[in-house]
Image (cartoon, rainbow, N blue to C red):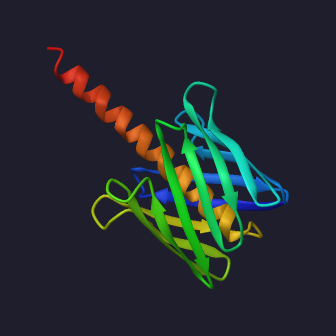
Amino acid sequence: MSELNGRIGGVTQGYDLHAGWNGERLDGRIGGTFQGKDIKLTVRAGDVDGRIGGTFAGFDADGDVTPQSVSVRLGGRIDGDDVHLQISGDRVRGRYSGRIDGKDIDLHVSGDRLHGRIGGVLDGKDVNLTLNGVPVEVAALAAVCAYKALEDQQAQDASAASSSNSGG
């Protein structure tokens, strides 16, 4: 079994990503034991589907994954985000969430590492993963899933802090 390991985000505001790959299924964990989400993706004949998180606090992944591109919907039809990636040589580039309110994805493959950035210089997150035999397209999708899980958690934390501050 191949292993995908690394981190999305920084030291204090980031999530670890650890998952096993058996050639068809990526199974693992984004984040830690208490604050994080399980990741389960199945890839068959270019089609990917799966779930990140649990039944209630999570989101679906559904779309197409090939060695040249990723086109996946994370979440539902209304409250979800699109992921579009182009893979060429050692570059993975694309967009997460939309043309206006979305984030750029700029990743590089160096040997057995996938690294780069999702989002801009100020509001983006670093990606640093060791592939260990996991296909680049699957690893890149997992990185975006981890990014979404981290962004969702930070938005939830900010909302909770805002509501507790205004309740006084």
Quadrant hosting residue 24? bottom right
Q: Is residue 40 visible?
A: no
Return the residue nearer the eye: 3 or 75.
75
Q: Residue at x 66, y 67 (%)?
A: 137
Q: Could you tell me if residue 112 is visible in this image?
A: yes
Instruction: Report the front residue among 14 and 152.
Output: 152
Where is residue 133 shown, x and y percent of the image?
77, 70
> Whole-percent x and y of residue 16?
56, 52
Q: In which quarter of the image is the C terminus?
A: top left
Q: Residue furthest top?
A: 168
Q: How many labels does the image show?
A: 0
Question: Residue 91: x and y, percent?
Answer: 56, 80
Image coords of residue 4 (percent x, y): 69, 61
In the visual, does 83 lie left or right of 49? left
- Residue at (68, 58) in percent of width and height: 64
Taking the image as shown, residue 39 lies to the left or right of residue 156, namely: right
Q: Residue at x 54, y 36 (%)?
A: 76
When asked about the image quadrant of residue 22, the answer is bottom right
Residue at 24% x, 21% y is 164
Q: Is residue 54 above or below residue 73?
A: above
Q: Which residue lies furthest to the bottom in this view?
A: 89
Q: As drawn, is 125 to the left or to the right of 60?
A: left
In this rendering, the answer to whether 12 lies above or below 53 is: below
> In which quadrant will I find the N terminus?
bottom right
